[in-house]
């Protein structure tokens, strides 16, 4: 059974909730979802962080990239870009780039923000750029998914998203949940098709 890596960074919980729904879609399509996160970045150079998170999903390791048949990459929106924690991790994948570890594998991206026009689409596009450099095959969401036109909150053709609003509501809307599951299924089916070649 192919493994799809669902890799995310989340502070408030919204991006984590997206990751879990995408993983649900991956599992429903017949692949195994592997949920991983990245550690926070700190400017305190004297601070040492544990190699294992105190709670939640494990930190990603390079072996996860080698073993995955597909990748779903998620980050909250930070000024129209991915978070520094996710960027820091991606910047450390030069060896995987040189060895073409991810080349030819399918990928998708997802994000969350507190406002509807908080830079979700530019964040998703910024997350795609290093994946293109890795030689990955990017898959978005087609408008044949009804929730993409029905949503009054998150959801884009570039990848799933969530809008938490001023109240920082981490609960996904019905449309956001449906789009996550559809995205997970789409990614898993591509991973299975490519794995058979």
Image: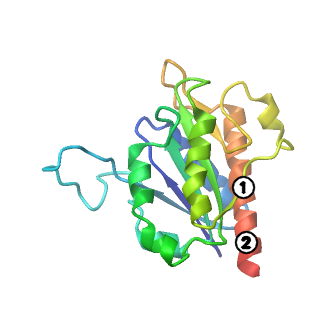
Q: Do the residues labelled 1 and 2 touch (CB within 8 Å)?
A: no
Mark 2 Cα shell of 10 Å, populated few (<14), some (14-19), many (≥20): many
For the C terminus, the quadrant is: bottom right
Residue at horizontal 56%, vertical 40%?
123
Q: How far apart are marks 1 and 2 (CA)?
A: 14 Å
Note whether 49 is above or below 161 in the view shown.
below
Could you tell me which secondary element the residue under label 1 belongs to?
loop
Dividing the picture into quadrants, the one containing residue 125 is: top right
Which label was assigned to residue 49?
none
Is residue 115 positioned above or below 37 on the image? above
Disc nearer the start of the sequence (1/2): 1
Residue carrying label 1:
139
Q: What element carries label 2?
A: helix
How far from the left and from the top, in percent, is residue 181? 70, 49
| Residue with the mark numbered 2 | 192
Q: In this view, does 162 lie above or below 60?
A: above
Residue 189 sits in quarter? bottom right
Tell me where residue 57 appears, x and y as whole percent: 42, 55
Q: Considering depth in this image, is 47 or 177 the residue closer to the camera?
A: 47
Foreground mark, 1 or 2? 1
Farthest right residue in view:
144
């Amino acid at each position: 059974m192919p493994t799809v890596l669902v890799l995310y960074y989340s502070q408030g919980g919204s991006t984590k909730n997206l990751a879990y729904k995408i993983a649900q879609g991956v599992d429903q399509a017949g692949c195994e979802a592997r949920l991983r996160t990245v550690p926070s970045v700190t400017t305190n150079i004297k601070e040492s962080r544990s190699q294992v998170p105190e709670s939640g999903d494990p930190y990603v390791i390079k072996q996860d990239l080698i073993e995955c048949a597909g990748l779903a990459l998620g980050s909250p929106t930070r000024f129209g870009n991915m978070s520094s924690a996710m960027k820091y991790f991606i910047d450390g994948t030069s060896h995987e780039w040189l060895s073409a570890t991810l080349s030819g594998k399918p990928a998708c991206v997802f994000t969350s923000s507190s406002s509807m026009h908080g830079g979700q689409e530019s964040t998703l596009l910024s997350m795609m750029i290093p994946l293109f450099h890795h030689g990955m095959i990017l898959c978005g969401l087609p408008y044949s998914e009804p929730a993409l036109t029905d949503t009054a909150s998150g959801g884009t053709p570039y990848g799933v998203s969530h809008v938490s609003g001023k109240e920082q509501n981490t609960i996904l809307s019905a449309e956001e949940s449906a789009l996550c599951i559809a995205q997970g299924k789409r990614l898993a089916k591509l991973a299975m098709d490519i794995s058979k070649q």
